[in-house]
Image (tube, helix red, strand yellow):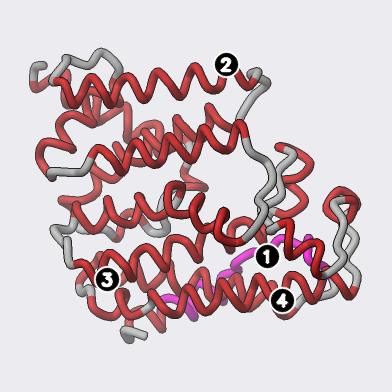
Amino acid sequence: MTDQDLAQAYAECQALARRHYENFPVGSWLLPRAMRRPVTVIYAFARTADDLADEGDLAPAERLAGLQKLTDMLDGIAAGTAQNDFIGRALVDVISRHQLPLQLFHDLLDAFRQDVTKTRYDNFGEIMDYCRRSANPIGRLLLQLHGDTDARHLAYSDAICSALQLINFYQDLHQDYVENGRIYIPRDELQRFDVTEDQFRDQRTDFALQRLMQLQYERAQRLLLSGAPLAKRLHGRFGFELRLIVLGGHRILQQLMRNPQNAFARPRLKPVDWLWMAWRALRGQ
């Protein structure tokens, strides 16, 4: 692969990230310069896989076939096979330069395959296992890019990423149900609080659903707080961005908790929220 081919591969990954700017990591421009290009490659890989699992009108078999092609690409990278796809070419360089574990990319694909085939979760342990593969690899990859492999930091990162994944579920209760037929609330807890799936379809919040969601919010908050020390341990641009991300998750949870009468209202961060988050992040809080 020539330098020109590699530069073009990175440019296409960056273009893909810009097209999906609304989902790109919070304040990605704040990242240390050395991390920005590799992050766009990881994002391009994850975004492509996520779209295969969720977007468009593909049949489940077609979605799984597309995800299998990405798995084959990872296997080819492991075997040293030249890659033709722009994501594959850029990924070869990023993995080599930063010694990124391929298993983390496989974990992401495994979670996206699960999104195609599994729409209900029997208990919270199953949901946390999904978060381990759908969210935690991203945090671990970013730490690896930062040159941080401290075991405690990885554990903190897992807690933050899992909490953010849960918060994302709670923002999108109705959307997940209507668009993809998924419910990310454990079945045993739905039964315990006498909440039915019809309530997700009809966006009906009663006292039972309020109690059920309060349990979800409080558990996610504890998980987020348990990982929050990482944001104070990391310095520079990366630490600042991580503090913004943690504070953003906390702010969304606050909004969810303050509106118990409508569990299906999607919180939105306003300029005043961003100012509050930036002030706290700058102070290292």
Q: Which of marks 1 and 4 is nearer the N terminus?
A: 4
Dot 1: few (<14), some (14–19), or many (≥20) neighbours within 10 Å?
some
Q: Which residues are drawn in magenta?
A: 262-278
Q: Earlier in the sequence, mark 2 or mark 1?
A: 2
Pointer 1: what residue? 267
Mark 2 vs mark 1, CA separation in Å: 33 Å
Residue 202 lies in the magenta-colored region: no
Dot 2: few (<14), some (14–19), or many (≥20) neighbours within 10 Å?
few
- Tag 2, which secondary structure? helix
Pointer 4: what residue? 214
Pointer 2: what residue? 62
Q: Earlier in the sequence, mark 2 or mark 4?
A: 2
Assess whether mark 4 and mark 3 are in contact (beta carbons under 8 angstroms). Answer: no
Three-letter residue code for mark 1: Pro
- Tag 1, which secondary structure? loop
Give residue 43's position: percent from left, percent from top. 37, 41
Q: Residue at x 82, y 70 (%)?
A: 193
Three-letter residue code for mark 4: Gln
Marks 3 and 2: which is nearer the front? 2
- Tag 3, which secondary structure? helix
Pointer 3: what residue? 239
Q: Which residue is drawn at 68% across and 41% down?
A: 119
Residue 267 lies in the magenta-colored region: yes
Q: Residue at x 53, y 27 (%)?
A: 52
Marks 1 and 4: which is nearer the front? 4
